[in-house]
């Protein structure tokens, strides 16, 4: 059930009311309880959250959800917690999508500082979590990492050993690298990650020594997203510096 639909559902309203009432049993400060009650009162309140108030909401919710004392059978608020847990993930997923939709890089960076993103994995839709991980990874890069990314392009390709006659007509053969398609990837784009996974599957099924490799090249070396006709000098350079990629 979508969050907007929940707010119009009488049963959901009752579940939320039960949960808010149960907050008094939790090991939280009175200020935290009041804050949660205010934040969970309606969708308009949630939509307006940002900055410290938003981080506070995430951390209080996660602490309540993960504290074993609050999830043990026999806890005074166990029934209310169990009921609310069914809707918990929908609320957290909605909040994360709200953060991502704002497109405010500065706020996203602060969010990553104040909220343990790893703890959100089991409470989010897979695509939402993947987007959040990529965006926060982008924002948390060190100055050295940013400089490296600014100066280099990242490529992934399926490669396999190939023997070519050298020089032509000599009867002598040398081992070189056959590159199926040198594909430029944005490491922080979900669509590119999906493409790389498909390439990994294809490499496994092709056999013939096919492997998935990655390499960085100085920015502007190749302008196209996909590249098949590469000069020999570049193939040799890639062969020397490639690294196997496990996806």
Image (cartoon, helix red, strand yellow):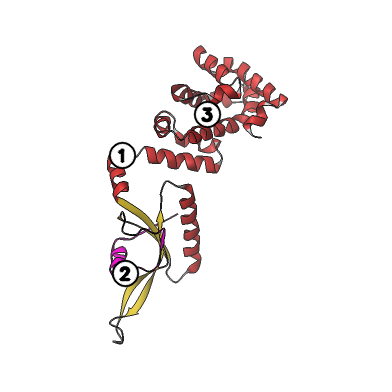
- The residue that disc 3 covers is 66
Q: CA distance from mark 2 to mark 1?
A: 34 Å
Is residue 93 shown above or below 69? Answer: below
Q: Position of residue 68 (x, y in %)?
A: 53, 27
The N terminus - image quarter:
top right
Quadrant of the frame with the C terminus: bottom left
* Label 1 with label 3: CB-CB less than 8 Å: no
Element type where label 3 sits in the image = helix
Q: CA distance from mark 1 to mark 3?
A: 31 Å
Residue name at image x 50 percent, y 58 percent: 198
What's the mark number on residue 142?
A: 1
Task: Give residue 177's position: percent from left, percent from top.
Answer: 35, 70
Q: Do the residues bearing badges 2 and 3 touch, measured as CB atoms within 8 Å? A: no
The magenta segment: 223-247
Mark 1 residue crowding within 10 angstroms, few (<14) / some (14–19) / many (20+): few
Residue at left 31%, top 39%? 142
Q: Position of residue 50 (x, y in %)?
A: 47, 25
């Amino acid at each position: 059930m979508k969050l907007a639909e929940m707010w119009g559902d009488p049963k959901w309203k009752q579940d939320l009311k039960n949960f808010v009432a149960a907050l008094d049993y939790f090991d939280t400060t009175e200020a935290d309880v009041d804050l949660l009650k205010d934040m969970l009162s309606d969708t308009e309140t949630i939509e307006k959250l940002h900055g410290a108030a938003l981080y506070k909401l995430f951390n209080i919710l996660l602490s309540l959800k993960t504290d074993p004392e609050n999830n043990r059978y026999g806890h005074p608020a166990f029934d209310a917690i169990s009921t609310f847990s069914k809707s918990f993930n929908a609320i957290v997923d909605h909040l994360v999508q709200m953060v991502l939709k704002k497109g405010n890089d500065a706020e996203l960076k602060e969010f990553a500082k104040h909220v343990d993103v790893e703890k959100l994995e089991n409470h989010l839709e897979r695509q939402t979590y993947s987007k959040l991980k990529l965006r926060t990874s982008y924002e948390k890069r060190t100055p050295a990492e940013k400089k490296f990314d600014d100066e280099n392009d990242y490529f992934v390709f399926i490669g396999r050993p190939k023997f070519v006659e050298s020089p032509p007509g000599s009867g002598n053969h040398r081992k070189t690298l056959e590159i199926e398609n040198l594909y430029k990837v944005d490491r922080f784009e979900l669509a590119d990650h999906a493409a790389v996974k498909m390439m990994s599957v294809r490499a496994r099924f092709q056999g013939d020594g096919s492997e998935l490799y990655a390499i960085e090249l100085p920015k502007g070396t190749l302008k196209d997203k996909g590249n098949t006709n590469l000069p020999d000098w570049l193939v040799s350079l890639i062969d020397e510096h490639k690294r196997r990629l496990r996806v």
